[in-house]
C-alpha cells in the first residue's frame, strides 16, 4: 500500500518563483495558475509518492519515495504511465507522482479530492492541460 503524503504550508516566495511548501520528504516549488473561470490557484505537479518502479522495483509493490535535499521543482509535466494511448505526450514507467492544487489563499485545512481518471485501468491520465 502507498502511504498518504502530508503537505503542510511553508513560506511563500515571490510570485515570479512560485509558492514553496514543506512536505515530510522536503521542500517543493509550485506555481500559480488561473482557472478557466478566472480564479487563481496554486499547483504542484510531480511530487513523487514512490520510488520509480524500474530495475529491481519493477512489478513490485511501490516503495515510498525518499527524502530529497534542496527544493524539488514541481512546475512541469510528469509523464503518463506506459500505455497504448491515443493521447500525445511522454510515457514512462517512472510515473508515480502526485499533483496537488489549492486556492491561492488556501492557508486553512481544506477537503481533499482524489481524482482517479477513467479508462477502465487500461488507458488515461490527468495532467495540467486538463486542470480546472
Image (spheres, grey):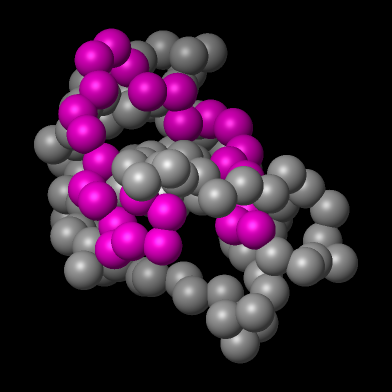
Magenta includes 55? no
Name the one closer to the observer, 125 or 109: 125
Residue at figure coordinates x 17%, y 49% from the top left: 6
Question: Is residue 44 depicted above or below 11 in this figure?
Answer: below
> Is 51 left or right of 54, judged from the image as shown?
left
Name the one closer to the observer, 23 or 31: 23
- Rendered-image quadrant of the N terminus: bottom left
> Is 45 left or right of 82, judged from the image as shown?
left
Work out whether residue 80 can be spotted.
Answer: yes
Q: Position of residue 83 (x, y in %)?
A: 70, 65
Residue at figure coordinates x 19%, y 59% from the top left: 4
Residue at figure coordinates x 17%, y 60% from the top left: 3
Q: Position of residue 69 (x, y in %)?
A: 24, 15
Q: Position of residue 88 (x, y in %)?
A: 84, 53
Principal secondary structure, stretch drawn in magenta: loop
Magenta includes 70? yes
Q: Quadrant of residue 68?
A: top left
Q: Residue furthest toward the bottom?
A: 120
**Count of picture labels:** 0
Work out whether residue 41 can be spotted.
Answer: no
Q: Which residues are magenta?
A: 57-82
Amino acid at each position: 500500500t502507498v502511504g498518504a503524503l502530508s503537505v503542510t504550508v511553508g513560506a511563500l516566495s515571490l510570485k515570479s518563483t512560485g509558492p514553496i511548501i514543506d512536505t515530510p520528504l522536503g521542500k517543493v516549488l509550485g506555481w500559480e495558475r488561473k482557472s478557466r473561470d478566472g480564479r487563481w490557484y496554486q499547483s504542484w505537479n510531480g511530487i513523487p509518492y514512490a520510488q520509480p518502479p524500474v530495475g529491481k522495483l519493477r512489478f513490485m509493490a511501490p516503495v515510498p519515495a525518499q527524502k530529497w535535499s534542496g527544493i524539488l521543482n514541481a512546475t512541469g509535466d510528469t509523464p503518463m504511465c506506459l500505455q497504448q494511448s491515443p493521447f500525445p505526450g511522454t510515457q514512462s514507467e517512472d510515473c508515480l507522482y502526485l499533483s496537488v492544487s489549492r486556492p491561492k489563499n488556501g492557508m486553512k485545512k481544506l477537503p481533499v479530492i482524489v481524482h482517479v481518471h477513467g479508462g477502465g485501468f487500461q488507458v488515461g491520465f490527468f495532467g495540467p492541460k486538463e486542470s480546472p
